[in-house]
Amino acid sequence: MIVIYMVIMAILIAFLGLGTSKNLIKSIMFLNLLQANIILLFISFSYKADTIPPIMPGTIERMTDPMPQALMITAIVIGASVTALALMFSIKIFHHFGTLDWDLIKKRMD
Amino acid sequence: MEKLLYTLIFLPIVLGVFIYLVNSVKLYRWIYLAEAVVMVITLQLLGAVKKGIVLYEVIGGWEPFIGIGLKFDALSATFIILATFLFTVILIFIYQSKDHDFKFLFFVLLLQGTFNGFVLSDDIFNIFVMLELITIISTILIIYKKDAHSLKAGIYYLLFNTVGMMIYLIGVIILYLRFGTLNLSLMAELVTATGMDDTVRIGVILMVSAFGVKSAVFPVYDWLPKAHSAAITSISALLSGLLVKTGIIGLMKLTSVFKIFDFSGLFYLLGIFTALMGVVFAFSQKDIKQILSFHTVSQIGLIMIAFSINIDMALLYLVSHSLIKSLLFLGSGIVINQYKERRVDKIRGLWENDSLLSVFLIIGTFALAGIPFTSGYIAKSAMGMNLPLWQLLPLVLVNSLTAGSMFKILQILGSHQPVKVDVKTSKYVAMGFLSLAIFFLGTLFPDYQSMTRDLWYYFKPMNLVKTSFEVLLGITWFFAFGIHEKALMKKMRHFSLSFDNGIVLLVFFVLSLVVFI
């Protein structure tokens, strides 16, 4: 149960960070924090104490729900690709503007 | 029959991958064949659905409550037909230009397949995956020019929409824990059996707010004008015509499941704020593409208002706006490329340089302002006839400001400014198709599904008076504020949110929706 409270705290921290950080890399990192904690939230919500993976025969009574894991693997892949793309673009942005600060980027645009 | 649904998704994707691997644009003509095949299959399936056959396929043959469902009904058929038409037009548009190297074609075809997949999918997690894919691919297409402007707009678009989709994911988790399934059709049965409680309500409202981010409603609209005006011509048309509607399509899917929940008040409020803010900002702009992108924001608001009446009205307005906005973006993109200038007060003499292009721009602007015999008139008057008077009055203001800023665009036609114009024929062909479709919707095909009425139903004296009043008021706005700008308008023109303030507004938006219910 304590995990869930910590995860919710981390989600709030991630939103706080996204709403205050002025640096592009920091924004991407807080987005990553948000994604990781939402995934952890789902996993810890669907965790039940005395269950086992449904692999061996005869485990069907005590099996754990495999759906959250299957979904969250997909979410992790999407998160990784978004992060990779965003980091690649931030390299390009650094080459163009010489900075990664949102305000400075805006200023140098005009 | 159900297996044909895979063709709609995978035919464009496979062709795109093939073009990428063969590394040649010589296969370009085969794309039109593929588009025609997709169109024919969709029409065939639509015929089957009209006869009462249920087209439902679960990928991999699993049980519906664990597998990914694909659902084909009249709603998704409409969107696939619209998407195929728009993609074909865009592909005709770029046929003779330098834009169509094989990588570009690969991404465009991938986008089409993903969009069809999104429209067909009947599973809330699959909708999340498809929306994220659409975001990633359209980011790559926005940044395709690789200049400073589009890079900044693209990264803003990517990060902002991803944060929005994370909120959607929280909603998915809540609904899965409550219902034990992700399938929308099964969820609809469960909801009618058990009713709504607070958990479901919060889950649904988180998903609604994520779709709101995706379709750029009032406090979270700021990514749209940036991205849509920074992209290259064909991609701006695609983004504004089709992809910004993914949020509305998602809302249509949700509302058809959670019927007990009354969304109409919420949609009216969101819509009226979005429409007013969008149109006021649009009127203060001077860059053609910025005017058009802010108009997309305000038209999204109008679609939401139409949605608060019923879903058919929203569909009518959505299809009409897709055609009009694509035409306008294509036309203004050509103007910008020829004049190497984006400001409406610097471009002059388009009529004497290229009268055919001017005709297309006139058709587009008139349709957006709602002049009779265009699809915009039908959509606007159908909406006006179904709203009470106090709800209609803000709409008259919005429509008159729309007409006013359309005159702002049309001022580029007059006067003299010699520029050597060299436009390829295929671009005119593409815009011709779009204009024909606008007139087709506006004259021969004014009814959609349940609204079986003839054209003259919309020509009530009341509507004509309303339209002419709006246009006259628009001309007044134009002459009062459009030519000599006031200090306030200059301030508004340069107003834009930074990323962190945008996120603060997003959180505020989500929280206020949660409190609202």
Image (cartoon, coloured by chain):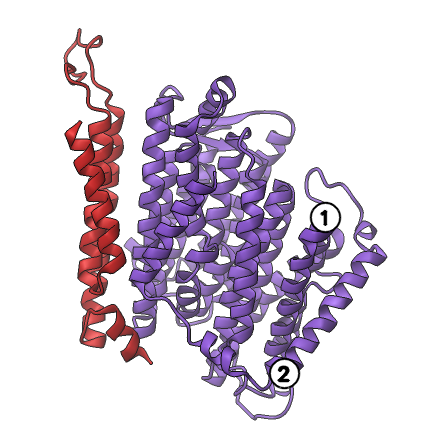
- Asked if residue A105 shows in the view, the reply is yes
Q: Amino acid at mark 1?
A: Pro
Residue at 22% of width from left, 49% of height from top? Answer: A14
Q: Residues within 10 Å of mark 2 (few under 14, many from 20)?
A: many
Q: In the shown orientation, is residue B517 left or right of residue B61?
A: right
* Colour for chain B in the figure: purple
Residue placed under numbered mark 2 in the picture: B413
* Colour for chain A in the figure: red
Rounded to the nearest angstrom, the CA distance separating label 1 from label 2 is 38 Å
Q: In the shown orientation, is residue B511 left or right of residue B283?
A: left
Residue placed under numbered mark 1 in the picture: B388
**Location of residue B118 in the rendering, given as x and y in whole percent from the top left corner:** 43, 42
Mark 2 belongs to chain: B
Residue A68 lies, with reference to residue A56, above or below; the image says below
Residue at 42% of width from left, 76% of height from top? Answer: B494
Q: Nearer the viewer, residue A106 or B28?
A: A106
Rendering quarter of residue B360: bottom right
Q: Amino acid at mark 2?
A: Leu
